[in-house]
Amino acid sequence: MGGTPRDMPRLGIRLHGGLAPRHCVELAVAAEAQGFASVWFAENPLERGALPALAACAAATRRIELGIGVWNPFLRHPAQIAMDASALDELAEGRLTLGIGAGLAAPIRRLGIDNAKTLAALRDTFAIVRGLLAGEAVTHKGKVFIVEDVKLSYKPHRPDLPILLAARGPKALALTAEVADGLMVSNMCPPGFTRWAAAIARPARLVQYAPCVVAADRETARAAIRPVLASLLRTFWTLGLKVPAAKASLVDHSGIPETEFAAAVAGPATALDERFVDAFAVAGTADDCRTRIAAYGAAGVTDLVLTFVGPDPVRDMARFSLGPTA
């Protein structure tokens, strides 16, 4: 792609609990060598925890930003989030960005955790984590989390470590504007949704995830992305049937009628037409990918974080030709 123009989002890669920690290290090292700006670690219930891979990647890299995307306060107490994030930032010498979110409600409830007060939990978490990272003694009597005169036993490496909020619904987006340093937007949210969300959250930084395949020819890349997209679509459509904000993020801003979503979920992956690929993925030749990345940039995305789903993610990274880091 010959470098990233200033009006294009910075590019990152997304790693996740489906990957062994050693493979995460290999991909993070490759991303740094290829000139990617960041590597983000998704953490979902009952998958591999992100902490081992994060620590290993912090030790194996030197320049690339490391993002936590995201830690959930219903699985990690806010004090534990502050402890782990601060220690990781120290290990990475100030390269960490912390993302916090309270999604995936159903699998968390199966663990016997009451996660009904999502917004209150997030508000409490930001207050506690920010205070602890600032080196303060924190007393906070919230609606979900309560701490009394707690303080980290060491001086945090960076008291102003940036904290982003993963949000989708209007109330969570409004909370982002109030408490966070930026917004995180998940997979399966088209650029139209991102533009709408940014108008509410007003983020200084906007990080968004998207699946990606880049290939020498367009049809090869599009064929490779369709089964991945079909699987994501089934997951998010099922969620959308229970959570109005999730359904709205799929349908209201994609330009695709709701009835066609239902048909796409029921049909084979090969039946997904170009509208679905363009709305929810970055796939095609380098020029095709440049066009889609620009669409996210026009929607307000500052950092587009790609999940390379092809058989050779290192080769796919190289096709972007960002150039090695200094």
Image: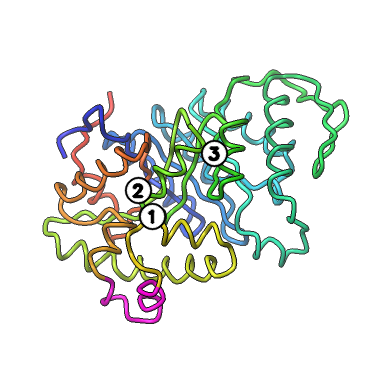
Q: Is residue 271 magenta?
A: yes
Give the amino acid at mark 3: Ala
State the image quarter where residue 124 is shown.
Answer: top right
| Residue at (47% x, 46% y) in the render | 185
> What element does badge 1 sit on?
loop
Above or below, 135 against 229 in this view is above
**Eye-nearest disc, 2 or 3:** 2
Residue behind mark 2: 191
State the image quarter where residue 51 is shown.
Answer: top right
| Residue at (41% x, 62% y) in the render | 251
- For marks 3 and 1, the one nearer the N-term is 3
Q: Are marks 2 and 1 in contact (CB under 8 Å)?
A: yes
| Image quarter hosting the C terminus | top left
| Residue at (56% x, 61% y) in the render | 244
- Outermost residue, bottom side: 267
Q: CA distance from mark 2 to mark 3?
A: 32 Å
Residue behind mark 1: 253
Position of 149 compared to 114: left or right? Answer: right
- Outermost residue, right side: 148
Residue behind mark 3: 55
Above or below, 316 against 179 in this view is below
